[in-house]
Amino acid sequence: MSKNDDIFSIKLRAYLHDPIDKCIDIPGHVERAKRYAEILHISGVEEAKGPDQIASCMERSLLPKGKIYKEFTEIRHPLSEGKLEAPHVDKNVFFQSVKEIFEDIANDFFQYSYRKKFLYLWRNLIELMCEKFKDKEIGKFIPVLPADTRIPDHSIWEHLKIASAIDALRDEENKQLNQNNSLFLFSIGPVQYFISQARKTHDLFMGSFILTYLTFKAIEIIIEKYGPANIIYPDLHGQPLMDHFLSKKEKIAVKNSSTDYTDQPTIPNRFVAIIPETDKAEIANLATEVEKAVKSEWKVMVNKVLDEFGLKNINSEFIEKQIKDFPEIYWTAIPLRKGEEDVNIDDFSEFFEEKLIKEWKEIYMLSETQGEYPPNIGLLYQLAYSALEKSMGARKNLRNFEQTEEFRKKCHLCGEREGVIEANKGNLKVGKYISSTEGLCIRCFTKRALDRYLTDVFGDKFKNFSFPSTAEVACSDFKERALRVAQDEFNEYVKAFKNILKDKFEQVDVSFLPKIEKDYGKTENLEGIWFFEKNLKEKEFIEQCDFNISQENIKDLEEKLKNLIKKVGKPNPYYAVIMLDGDSMGKWLSGENLPKIEYAYNSETWKKLPYDFKRDITQKLEGKFLTPAIHASISTALRNYAIEFVREIVEEQHLGKLVYSGGDDVLAFVNLRDLFEVIRQLRATFSGHTEYRNGKIEVDWTKNTGFVEKNGRYFLTMGPAATASCGVVIAHYKMPLKLVLDKIREMEKNAKKVDGKDAFGIALMKHSGQIKEFVCKWRLQKDGQWIDTVEELNKLSEYFKKDETPKIKISRTFPYKLHDAFLRNKDKDGTVSITGTIFETELKRLLLRSLEGGGNKRERKKVADELSEMLLALFWHSGIGSNIDKFVNLLEVARIISTTEE
Ligand SMILES: [Zn+2]
């Protein structure tokens, strides 16, 4: 057995030390764990006590002495007050089924190495369980079965993951727990700076992909040495790159594999791991190894791309010079052992104020004197993790900036390095990878043409890969309409293009947005810009595809496009970019936002705890604290969000395309038609405020359990106490992408500045250069009732729409008229200084005069009343802050969503 396999034999035992059905019957759990392990010919699972004790420090420390027993009646949400009631289970039937699962696994299992056995169970056991119980009442609870029935606030899966990650040994003779672990944090960057160096959406996507891919290369080193369970954040289970790694490198048959989505960046640019090293030099060696892996992969990527275009004759020193300062790498570690002893609370005093250290000592003491078992290092996890983040923060401040030099020709993408790569060098031709006017540096060109490298790694997934352009996103609702009602005209137009461009057609042949592809199958498509009449010009054909088109051909195309537009209307030239991220994630991760301690317990257990114990514990502890298992739960919730929900909302149910979805971040392009619904669903799902109805996600703000049921499984989310903010930019498809990306960051920041965060900000960047923006809360409270702001905005935009329901319309000039009406009553920031009654009267008067399109007087009056009530609520309560300028901007945004002019 190799040393590596030795490590995995221990991990395997830790992973099997508790049966997955522990909560169903606690008294028999030790015996069942042994029995299940024996089916797999693994013995000694009862020896894995050390890791178990650290992983479950919470339960062990926070129950009073004397055995407290509780049946499985509840599942607690780890991050909120939410809970689920446990289903009825027929124990014997259940245990028999679990036994059968292990017997099935055992068939191939004996020939695997310990390492492969561990990886197999870590990835597939939960899938096999879900499959086996899918028609039973218990089925949907499988992913959230608690590890403990008395403190049921984290699942058995998280508990087993942490237990297998921790290196610890229980010394029974001396009644000691010996552990040897460090927390390790690694990150690569720069993120925003690197990805926003983009001229095309394709550059942006590849920038984001490179960061995900290189971070995963770093993670691979940890996985190879210690396994995927040692990565505490992000949770790797079911991640596309992880599944790819398991099937390609480890030859494991992955159940319910996500390898179909390897083209989606879902790994954040940082990871937190538990590593079984505490010696400073050893940790530094590991970090160096990880760093080398990342840097050498980056070099391989660059060289492969250059090679593909016959550009290898560039001097290697020059290449090195252009790529060397990327990626920046940062790491830090906090050992949990110092010499022969565990670290203690005082060891963290350099990171925290004295008061906090004192509080922690009291908690520790409480646990020591009153707890069921003595506390251990697991109780200090929150301190250790906070110290880890603080120490990383300090490191990042040390960053050096290099001076930029002046060149003959600057790279068109970054503007920093020399743009040495141009069309017609090597075998690089004008087209997809470079336009006739561009010069790119090596780093930016690698970004641009990375799909050539990725085809090698991931196969067909990246063959002829194209990320939809801004024009393609903008006109995709038009295309969807065309495929529905004017398929012949659409095909005629595309065919004409094909006939004219011949072999150059491939330059304009792109994929539809995923939803269209899903609904209409693989139909021939044509790049979005060619559906805007203005672009049918000689100059455009030369620039985009190096083609000299005749006037006669242009006429032909114009006519065919007109036929199409006659049937479906003009395409809207505006599209949206959205950037969403969780609010106060630092506070969540440092334990500050966790619910009160009583919400860790089964509610009946809590009621029955001795009065004195409850009093002491609530005095010392304001909220729950961050244990390794709770930290792992946060990772699980974020993984579920990114992998299970975001893609579905953006790409499967709406006209959108993701650039990135990982951790608590989302970056995506969305067609205007679906914008409001997409951001509303993304926000609501982040906190578990959604439900599946007839296979579709629906927002439901009354749902407070923190778990969302999908495809017969409960998925953990961040829960009702979590919030998220979002920046949106609506831009003309010709607006330089760099400007749009800078603006979106600003809008996201503005949203976070709103009192209590939980807001969104929208900027409309008009083709004229004018920018109209506003920020408001997702929900507003009026007369004690919650109103969903985005839902109201959506309704409002319907009133600006032409030729569709409802039949009474608001005139497109209404926003300007409203603006002019209050010109004299506002200060220089736009805040109006008149009474509510005057404002209301004037608003109603203007609105009534701006209604058009039909209906009798009474009907119009009714619409005006309803609309003005909605508008007043938005004006006074949404966070707009009675600012008339911003309010007019909001109206303009609602208008542009449903119109196609300009
Ligand atoms: Zn560049």
Image (spheres, grey):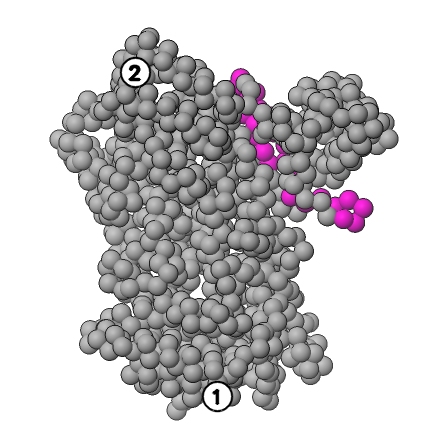
- Kindly indicate the quadrant of the structure image that contains residue 312: top left
Q: Which residue is mark 2?
A: 542
In this picture, residue 504 sits left or right of residue 812: left
Say what amino acid the circle numbered 1 marks.
Gly
Q: Position of residue 156 (x, y in %)?
A: 47, 73
Q: Looking at the image, which residue sits at the far front?
A: 488
Foreground residue, 27 or 335?
Answer: 27
Left or right, 55 with reference to 430: right
What residue do we see at 67% from left, 81% from top?
609
Q: Nearer the viewer, residue 642 or 425?
A: 642
Task: Decide: is 470 above or below 130.
Answer: above
* Residue 693 versus residue 834 in the image, above or below: below
763 is within the stretch colored magenta: yes
As drawn, the residue found furthest toward the left would be 313
Residue 231 visible in the current orientation: yes
> Looking at numbered disc 2 in the image, what kind of residue is underneath it?
Ile
Helix, strand or loop status at disc 1: loop
Is residue 778 magenta-colored? yes
**Mark number for residue 28?**
1
Q: Which residues are magenta?
A: 761-785
